[in-house]
Image: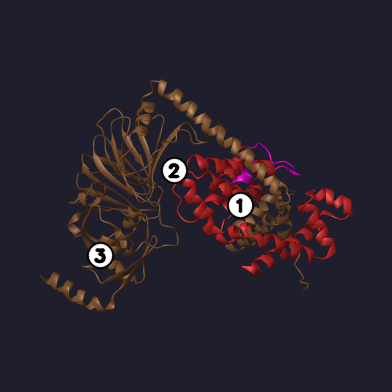
């Protein structure tokens, strides 16, 4: 084994002091500053810290582990018992919200989904009710005030016990369509990671998936107030009218430059200038929007028009709960229009093949799309021909 | 290992309690080890991990996991451990007690979780590699490291027993850690 001469620097001692719980306040401050000084320092620290963590060789004996599991199982059984006791108690209480919650339990909605309302999230402040729709399904619910909500695949909606008392506030991750019950005295508020929408009696759609770069809200009827956090950390307010859609560009990290390419991704380039009513630095508002293109996902017939495959793919991934892989980037540019009802993925892909030179292969729940070079030219001819007409 | 966990998760979402048991036995030691690096206390770490797994089971039909399930597990444990630490008044066994709020902030800002680390946490070889690395250390270095890591003696106690300065003790520990990180790094 080679003997390495290691530099006895102050930092190494400090790090060890921290790890062994023998660091004093001053040294701690100094260490913090050193770590925050650069990414390398941080990495250096993490390296030693990881080695420390990994070296804790508490080899759990088989019996020790088994006992731990038995102890855990007891907690489990206790908790399940607790919940059933409480649901029993709740139904007796004439509380608006709780009655609604149990109503939802019985309303086994048609697409074969299992719905369970979690009334008590451990460690949460007050009681929060959370409703999630897994990938591959959609569903609709009715809130205590009569508001109807349609939830798209991969969406979570959360609201507090206090819903309806002063305001009607919800937290949304994913996509939902709201048909808000009129109630002037209780503003209806939907919060997403960057956009907050306030409505009185309206119909609108919000799309706020965490893995996408934009959040958008489309108004069908009524009026909504949209508040967004701009890049300077200030709140900007915008009012939308029917057939308007706002596209908000989520906070961009310092190192990314705001360029046209982001608009590209939001598919704005295809929108004629007259229909872009406002270009804020962090958002764009479109008017004369065909709202059903953005809201029909909730209906039996989902209407798509001129949607590039690049942005259509994530929507399909969620709707069918599968992965789509592009072998060639240029495939993403091909646009699709049509209506999707109850087609299987296979039928859908076959239909898509009629208007784009793509080949596909399905492997469990992954679809691989490849460009069919032979047909590419044919399609090219057809496309330009169409455009000149 | 990671793909196995995704499978167990799928079965758990369908209510398979046996899958939960398998998952528990497979991951509990690693998760506790990690939680302990944040909380500094074994018992609290075990409580945290049990809380995470309990919530996982109770909310199994509601949770949507994006990405690998094992990262999800670790992130949950990471967050719970931070909260648990925050709720504690003081850090035990500190020579000079650091205000916990500060420590909490430090840990939440500087503890990075990456896939490689998570993999190593689970891997069986990790323990063996580390054991080997320790065996190869010079005698006193090895002795000191063992006393600190496995007999969990404080720096003061070790210094007193071996009649060495605290600085020397810490240096030995540093050397051991350095050696370990070399071995683990070269193995990935």
Pointer 2 with pointer 3, Cβ within 8 A:
no
Classify residue A117 by image quadrant: top left
Q: In which quarter of the image is the N terminus of chain B?
A: bottom right
Give the magenta part as a residue range.
Answer: B88-104
In the image, which lettered chain appears brown?
A
Mark 1, residue position: B26
Q: Earlier in the sequence, mark 1 or mark 2?
A: 1
The residue carrying pointer 2 sits among few (fewer than 14), some (14 to 19) or many (20 or more) residues within 10 Å by Cα, namely many
Q: Indicate the secondary structure of the residue bearing disc 3.
A: helix
- Of all chains, the one bearing label 2 is B
Along the viewing direction, whichever of B146 and A102 lies nearer the viewer = A102
What residue sits 28% from the left and 31% below the top?
Answer: A146
The residue carrying pointer 1 sits among few (fewer than 14), some (14 to 19) or many (20 or more) residues within 10 Å by Cα, namely some
Q: Find residue A158 and report its horizontal and vertical position in percent.
A: 40, 38
Along the viewing direction, whichever of B121 and A66 lies nearer the viewer = A66
Q: Distance between the residues labelled 1 and 3?
A: 43 Å
Classify A39 as above or below A86. below
Q: Find residue A13 and report its horizontal and vertical position in percent.
A: 74, 57
- The reply to whether label 1 and label 2 mark residues of one chain is yes
Chain B drawn colour = red
Mark 3, residue position: A350
Along the viewing direction, whichever of B40 and B49 lies nearer the viewer = B49
Q: Indicate the secondary structure of the residue bearing disc 2.
A: loop
Q: Distance between the residues labelled 2 and 3?
A: 33 Å
The residue carrying pointer 3 sits among few (fewer than 14), some (14 to 19) or many (20 or more) residues within 10 Å by Cα, namely some
Classify A375 as above or below A351. below
- A293 to the left or right of A14: left
Q: Distance between the residues labelled 1 and 2?
A: 22 Å
Mark 2, residue position: B61
- The reply to whether label 1 and label 3 mark residues of one chain is no
Magenta span includes B93: yes
Along the viewing direction, whichever of A323 and B100 lies nearer the viewer = A323
């Amino acid at each position: 084994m080679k003997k390495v001469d290691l530099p006895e620097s102050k930092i190494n001692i400090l790090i060890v002091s921290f790890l062994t719980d023998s660091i004093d306040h001053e040294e701690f401050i100094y260490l913090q500053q050193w770590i925050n000084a650069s990414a390398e320092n941080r990495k250096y620290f993490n390296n030693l810290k990881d080695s420390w963590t990994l070296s804790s060789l508490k080899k759990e004996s088989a019996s020790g582990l088994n006992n731990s599991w038995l102890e855990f199982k007891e907690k489990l059984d206790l908790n399940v018992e607790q919940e059933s006791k409480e649901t029993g108690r709740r139904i007796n209480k004439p509380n608006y919200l709780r009655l609604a919650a149990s109503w939802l339990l019985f309303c086994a909605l048609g697409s074969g989904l299992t719905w369970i309302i979690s009334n008590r999230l451990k460690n949460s402040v007050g009681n929060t009710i959370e409703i999630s729709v897994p990938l591959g399904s959609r569903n609709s619910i009715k809130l205590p005030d009569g508001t109807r909500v349609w939830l798209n695949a991969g969406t979570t909606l959360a609201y507090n016990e206090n819903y309806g008392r002063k305001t009607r506030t919800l937290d949304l991750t994913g996509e939902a369509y709201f048909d808000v019950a009129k109630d002037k005295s209780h503003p209806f508020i939907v919060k997403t990671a960057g956009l907050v929408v306030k409505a009185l009696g309206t119909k609108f759609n919000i799309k706020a998936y965490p893995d996408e770069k934009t959040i958008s809200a489309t108004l069908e009827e009524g009026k909504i107030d949209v508040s967004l956090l701009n890049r300077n950390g200030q709140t900007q307010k915008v009012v939308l009218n029917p057939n308007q859609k706002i596209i908000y560009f989520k906070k961009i990290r310092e190192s990314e430059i705001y360029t046209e390419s982001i608009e590209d991704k939001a598919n704005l380039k295809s929108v004629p200038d007259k229909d872009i009513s406002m270009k804020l630095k962090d958002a764009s508002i479109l008017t004369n929007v065909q709202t059903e293109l953005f809201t029909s996902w909730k209906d039996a017939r989902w209407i798509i028009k001129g949607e590039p495959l690049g942005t259509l793919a994530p929507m399909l991934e969620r709707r069918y709960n599968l992965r789509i892989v592009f072998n060639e980037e240029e495939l993403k540019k091909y646009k699709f229009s049509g209506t999707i009802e109850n087609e299987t993925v296979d039928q859908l892909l076959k239909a898509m093949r009629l208007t784009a030179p793509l080949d596909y292969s399905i492997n469990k729940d992954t679809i691989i799309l490849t460009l069919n070079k032979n047909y590419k030219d044919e399609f090219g001819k057809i496309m330009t021909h169409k455009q000149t007409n | 290992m990671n793909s196995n966990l995704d499978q167990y998760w799928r079965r758990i979402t369908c209510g398979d309690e046996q899958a939960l048991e398998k998952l528990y036995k497979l991951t509990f030691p690693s998760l506790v080890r990690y939680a302990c690096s944040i909380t500094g206390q074994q018992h609290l770490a075990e409580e945290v991990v049990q809380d995470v797994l309990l919530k996982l089971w109770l909310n199994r039909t509601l949770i949507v996991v994006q990405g690998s399930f094992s990262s999800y597990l670790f992130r949950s444990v990471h967050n719970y451990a931070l909260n648990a630490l925050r709720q504690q008044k003081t850090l035990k066994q500190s020579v000079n007690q650091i205000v916990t709020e500060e420590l909490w902030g430090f840990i939440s800002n500087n503890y990075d979780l990456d896939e490689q680390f998570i993999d190593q946490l689970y891997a069986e070889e990790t323990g063996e590699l580390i054991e080997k690395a320790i065996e190869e250390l010079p005698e006193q270095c090895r002795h000191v490291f063992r006393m600190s890591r496995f007999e969990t003696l404080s720096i003061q106690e070790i210094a007193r027993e071996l009649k060495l300065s605290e600085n020397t003790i810490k240096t030995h520990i540093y050397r051991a850690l350095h050696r370990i990180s070399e071995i683990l790094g070269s193995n990935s």
